[in-house]
Image (cartoon, rainbow, N blue to C red):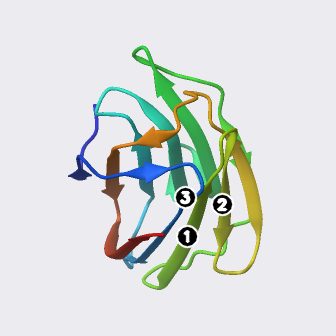
């Protein structure tokens, strides 16, 4: 299901915050950060789209369960620039993921899968990840 870089057997638990720093490609269409229990289920799909899938300069969030995408959530804040560094912080609470972007904007996405720990992380698309920090 997932392409790109896949990290298995990590531990991202309720109460922790994951910070991802990377650089988008100069000609980026989109990139994705996926968090879940394994390769077949995505609890949180974060997909900034510069120009992809019929969208421009929007963040699309979703989850993937049982072989199907669920209800999309779209965020208007888009502090990403082509070829530039970005920082995304994801706080994991029992009920949701609280995302803070580098411009200070925040939004929330429900923890639809309901687990208290996720062990798989995937990065895909037009960005190079520099650091991943979980505290």
Badge 2 local density, few (<14 within 10 Å), some, or many (20+)? many
Which mark's residue is nearer the viewer, 3 or 2? 2
User: Which quarter of the figure is the N terminus placed in?
Assistant: top left
Which residue: 33% across, 72% down?
A: 129
Asked whether the residues under the numbered discs 1 and 3 touch, taking CB atoms below 8 Å apart as contact, a structural biologist would say no
Q: Secondary structure at mark 1?
A: strand
**Nearest to the observer: residue 6 or residue 50:** 6
Which residue: 31% across, 33% down?
A: 38
Looking at the image, is mark 3 or mark 2 earlier in the sequence? 3
Looking at the image, is mark 1 or mark 2 earlier in the sequence? 1
**Nearest to the observer: residue 75 or residue 135:** 135
Which residue: 55% across, 79% down?
A: 81
Alpha carbon distance from label 1 to label 3: 11 Å
Which residue is label 1 attached to?
A: 88
Q: Secondary structure at mark 2?
A: strand
Q: Which mark is residue 48?
A: 3
Residue 15 screen position, x and y as percent: 60, 56
Alpha carbon distance from label 3 to label 2: 13 Å
Which residue is label 2 attached to?
A: 99
């Amino acid at each position: 299901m997932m392409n790109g870089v896949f990290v298995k057997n990590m531990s991202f638990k309720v109460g922790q915050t994951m910070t991802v720093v990377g650089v988008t490609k100069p000609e980026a269409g989109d990139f994705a950060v996926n968090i879940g229990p394994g390769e077949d289920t995505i609890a949180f799909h974060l997909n900034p789209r510069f120009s992809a899938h019929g969208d421009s300069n929007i963040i699309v969030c979703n989850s993937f369960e049982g072989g199907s995408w669920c209800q999309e959530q779209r965020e208007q804040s888009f502090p990403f620039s082509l070829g530039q560094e970005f920082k995304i912080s994801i706080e994991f609470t029992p009920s949701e993921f609280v995302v803070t972007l580098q411009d200070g904007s925040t939004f929330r996405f429900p923890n639809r899968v309901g687990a208290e720990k996720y062990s798989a992380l995937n990065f895909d698309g037009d960005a190079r990840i520099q650091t991943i920090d979980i505290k």
